[in-house]
Amino acid sequence: MSAREPHTASAPTAADVSRRVDAELARLLYRQAGFGMFSNITLALVLFFSVLDQVPRREAWSWLVLLLAVSAARMILNRAYFRQAPRDEDMAWWGRAFGAGTILSGCVWGWAGWLFVAPDDLLARSLTIFILAGLNAGAARTLAGALWVYGGYLAASLVPLAARFAVLPEPQWILTAIVLTYALFIYNTARMHHADLRKLHRLIFENEDLVGTLSLAKTRAEAASQAKSDFLATMSHEIRTPMNGVIGMLQLLRDSPLNAEQRENVAIATTSADNLLRLLNDILDLAKIESGKLEFESIVFSPAIAGEEVAALLRPRAEAKGIVLNFYADARLPAAVTGDPARLKQVLLNLLGNAVKFTERGEVALHVETVLSDREAALTRFRVRDTGIGLDAEMRARLFQKFTQADSSMARRYGGSGLGLAISQQLVQRMGGEITVRSAPGKGSEFSFELSLPVAQAAEMAADAPAARRKPLRGRVLVVEDDPVNQRVLEWMLQRLGVEVVVTDNGLSAVALVTEGDWSAILMDLQMPGLDGYEATRRIRQKLNGRPLPIVAVTANALPADRAATVAAGMDGFIAKPVKQEELRGMLERWLPAAK
């Protein structure tokens, strides 16, 4: 067992707990004694100089000297306690020593009650009564840790006062009764506080092992979460690197001259690769959502166009099954809103893709409608309706659980990981909505959610209007990539965009090449032998000495922390592998001009 792990072999016994509680309450006496002793001395001086002319001076001085001596002895005891820091088994003696000093101090104050109320002077009597009442009220809290100490102090300080009222030449029985009643009241207050203190410390010590176990469990859970994140980051990199070569080559092959059979084969391979990449993205999205690290963009887009694009992507799949896929946009929809169109499309693609998957005949439809709208925001409803197999109540209850489909037979018949709906629900919830479903077996289903989207102003719409992206680009790009397949994919993609390409396979070479020619941009892999992409970027920035040169990370490390690290290293952009040609074009268009 490590030094940091709590001992959990057996629960503490009642005797052990009682001993530890007694020791802790004794320590509490010492911790709270400092201000009480200071108050004793201050109030003693105030009382002494206030009544000095009303009582025999010799008795008054004797009382003051005795009180200061007792207070000094108590201070010495307190100092010795803090210097020695005694163990639990020694605290019984220290508690008795503290109690003896406190009760002795109470006796000295009891003498003051007997001595200073004898004169007929109203000030002397009133001040004595107020000071003794105040001292005992304050001690009810500071001495509650040891009830016998407080009881002794209370009796020693107030009983002489009550007795003095009873033996005056004209007995003050009412004052005697008041003093005794007050003593009983504040003793009962101290008794209840003592009971609460014992109960609190008993709970602490009885559950100390449990608290330690929970703390250890929390530490282990955090370590497991970090291990999961590290595993996902590693798997993301290891899977995305070859996937970049597969998907990149398929894109290039698709755009080359092919006969009908070859084109069909490429289409099948591309679909399989896209499905594999979608599964990887789902797993990564799920990890980001669970860790709270999923980020949302805020950009201007058209909800109608976003819906139409999703429908257009899935329409060929629907037509291949012989079903109709329709898209309906409300005429009242705002021209543009602000939000995250990529996440919205991800949700709609999942809902609409499921509708197509589980519908054998009839229609699938996507509706985008305005529920409420003003100049500031539009409450927009997205509905996906199908005439498919439908769901019963039990299926609907499990629908948004992770790694779950409606039933195992559907999983076998239709395939799928069971992650899409769970992720879609969490994405919509993060955007302020909730996916609901209406369905019955054999009668189709309708999935819907509503989002409040800020309406974009004219200036924002103009700033975000897309430019034409089909013109070739011109410039000279340095590709820093150690994987030969990925080198070839990036080289072909860039050549098709119209730019000149130079490839190097390591960071040191990239640093050396940066001053040899007029570069338009650098595409930098992150994980390379020798000098990695982060350090190579830092050295390039030093070598350029402030001269701007776009450096874009092209990497299989796709987690948010990886993006943040590239920014810290001085990179200007980030593209996750597998690289899509349109994504690469969109990134380079920020810096490279179009060819004339």
Image (spheres, rainbow, N blue to C red):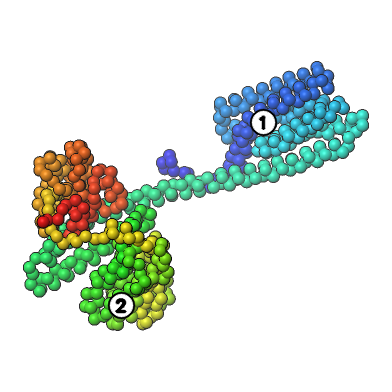
Residue for point 9% across, 65% down: 256
Q: CA distance from mark 2 to mark 1?
A: 81 Å
**Is 416 in front, or is 591?**
591
- Residue receiving disc 2: 364
Point 24% across, 74% down: residue: 315
Mark 2 vs 1: CB contact within 8 A: no
Q: Nearer the viewer, mark 2 or mark 1?
A: 2
Check disc 1 and give the amino acid type.
Gly
Q: Is residue 360 left or right of residue 74?
A: left
Q: Residues within 10 Å of mark 2 (few under 14, many from 20)?
A: many
Q: Is residue 537 above or below residue 459?
A: above
Q: Earlier in the sequence, mark 2 or mark 1?
A: 1
Residue placed under numbered mark 1 in the picture: 36
Left or right: 408, with 160 as reference point:
left
Query: Residue at 20% of width from left, 37% of height from top?
Result: 545
Check the image and name the residue furthest to the right. Answer: 170
Question: Residue pushed farthest front?
Answer: 458
How many neighbours does mark 1 have within 10 angstroms: few (below 14), some (14-19), or many (20 or more)?
some
Callout 1 secondary element: helix
Residue 227, horizontal then vertical, whole percent: 33, 50
Task: Determine which quarter of the picture holds residue 27.
Answer: top right
Q: Position of residue 146 (x, y in %)?
A: 67, 37
Q: Is residue 35 visible?
A: yes
